[in-house]
Image (cartoon, helix red, strand yellow):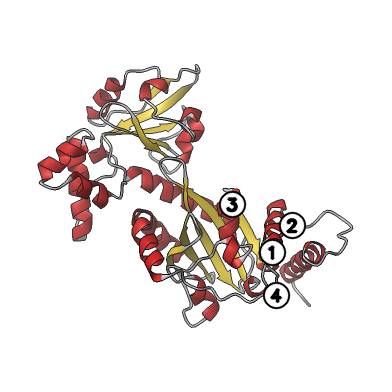
């Protein structure tokens, strides 16, 4: 006798099939469609592009010159994401799901986890340089996350093409320190049991990658922010990087939610526009050894808890037995910190060019 779980899975697939007949086959649904609204929007975009579910996909790599350009341009993202992808690989080890990282166009720039290279369906979509955008492979978590700019879950027949109906996937967009979408994180399984909880894992992991992108910015001061009563030092902190004069260099999504003035689009923002406090006081607080978080007033009348940190105290250190490249990057960060964010002075102290500092730290 089928289990309750098996029956629920069968019912879910039947509902998806009914929605496909209504939208893709032109049948009268007779009731509200049993799929998310964004799935229907994506299906209709695919139809408008002249795509048909029965068309076969080739999952071609983009041309070699374009592939080299994409790889080079996305090295900062790949480096920031690699520790997160490795942790995901361990988390997903027994689930038959794996992680895929794409740029903002949906082109794969990295993949990690239990990928069965003997399974062509897994191997094809995890090659660096394959285009998994909506215009190429139809409705997927990748195209949906990059279009909707929110975490999504997609199961089997919710994909547009029959060729992709073997996949189940979660996706979450990735936002850079300037607030623009820089890519997405995808967790995919091939003929795997539906795991909608992976949407939460993808979203949480995406935030970790975004935080790492912010922490890797050359900066003179890092502000960790949260509401009073919340502990600081965790992944849900608002992160704001300042230069030596108090100008905002970049921040994470949590900071943009705490401080709406940082939400794009917007011009240069000074810390004095955000906080009713002189920026010099942030540096004074950060220089105090083991200084506790402080409450700071906003111009709105609200208050936040803040912990200012100099780069050397914000996780920028040289670990034991670190690879040479990591030692080099840590030393460059240290020089930038000692120059209070002045990249020109840091470059002069190191005897390298300013362009080299930016390139090594992944800042354009």
Q: Which residue is mark 4?
A: 54
Q: Is residue 170 in sight in this rendering?
A: no
Q: Going 36% across and 61% down the picture, which residue do you hit?
A: 69
Separation (CA) of disc 3 from disc 4:
23 Å
Looking at the rendered structure, the secondary structure element under dot 3 is: helix
Separation (CA) of disc 1 from disc 2:
8 Å
The crowding category of the residue bearing disc 4, from other C-alpha atoms within 10 Å (few below 14, some 14 to 19, many at least 20), is few
The crowding category of the residue bearing disc 1, from other C-alpha atoms within 10 Å (few below 14, some 14 to 19, many at least 20), is many
Q: Which residue is mark 2?
A: 35
Q: Which residue is mark 3?
A: 147
Counting residues from the start of the chain, the first of labels 2 and 4 encountered is 2
Q: Is residue 301 in sight in this rendering?
A: yes
Residue 250 sits in quarter? top left
Counting residues from the start of the chain, the first of labels 3 and 1 encountered is 3
Labels 1 & 2 near each other (Cβ < 8 A)? yes
Label at residue 3? none
Q: Depth check: 117 or 7 in front?
A: 117
Counting residues from the start of the chain, the first of labels 3 and 2 encountered is 2
Look at the picture and state if 178 lies above or below 142. above
Answer left or right for 118 relative to 86.
right
Looking at the rendered structure, the secondary structure element under dot 4 is: loop
Looking at the rendered structure, the secondary structure element under dot 2 is: loop
Nearer to us of marks 2 and 4 is 4
Q: Which residue is mark 1?
A: 158
Answer left or right for 351 relative to 189.
left
């Amino acid at each position: 006798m089928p289990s309750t779980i098996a029956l629920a899975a069968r019912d879910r697939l039947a509902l998806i099939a009914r929605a496909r007949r209504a939208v893709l086959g032109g049948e009268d649904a007779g009731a509200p469609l049993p799929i998310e609204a964004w799935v229907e929007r994506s299906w209709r975009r695919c139809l408008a592009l002249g795509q048909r579910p029965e068309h076969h996909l080739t999952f071609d790599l983009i041309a070699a010159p374009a592939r080299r350009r994409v790889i080079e341009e996305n090295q900062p993202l790949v480096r920031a994401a690699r520790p997160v992808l490795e942790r995901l690989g361990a988390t997903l080890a027994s689930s038959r799901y794996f992680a895929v990282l794409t740029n903002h166009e949906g082109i794969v720039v990295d993949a990690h986890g239990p990928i069965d290279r003997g399974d062509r369906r897994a191997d094809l979509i995890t090659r660096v340089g394959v285009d998994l955008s909506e215009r190429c492979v139809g409705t997927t978590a990748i195209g949906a996350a990059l279009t909707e700019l929110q975490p999504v879950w997609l199961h089997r027949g919710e994909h547009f093409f029959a060729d992709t109906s073997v996949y189940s996937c979660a996706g979450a967009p990735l936002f850079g320190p300037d607030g623009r979408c820089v890519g997405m994180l995808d967790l995919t399984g091939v003929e795997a049991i539906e795991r909608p909880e992976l949407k939460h894992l993808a979203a949480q992991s995406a935030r970790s990658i975004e935080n790492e992108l912010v922490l890797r910015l050359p900066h003179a001061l890092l502000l960790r922010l949260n509401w009073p009563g919340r502990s600081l030092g965790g992944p849900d902190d608002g992160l704001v990087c300042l230069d030596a004069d108090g100008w905002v260099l970049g921040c994470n999504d949590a900071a943009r939610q705490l401080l709406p003035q940082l939400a794009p689009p917007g011009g240069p923002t000074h810390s004095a526009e955000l906080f009713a406090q002189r920026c010099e006081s942030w540096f004074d607080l950060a220089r105090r050894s083991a200084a506790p978080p402080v409450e700071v007033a906003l111009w709105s009348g609200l208050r936040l808890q803040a912990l200012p940190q100099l780069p050397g105290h914000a996780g920028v250190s040289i670990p034991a037995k670190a690879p040479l490249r990591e030692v080099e990057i840590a030393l460059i960060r240290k020089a930038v910190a000692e120059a209070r964010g002045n990249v020109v002075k840091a470059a002069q102290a190191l005897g390298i060019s300013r362009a080299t500092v930016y390139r090594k730290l992944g800042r354009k």
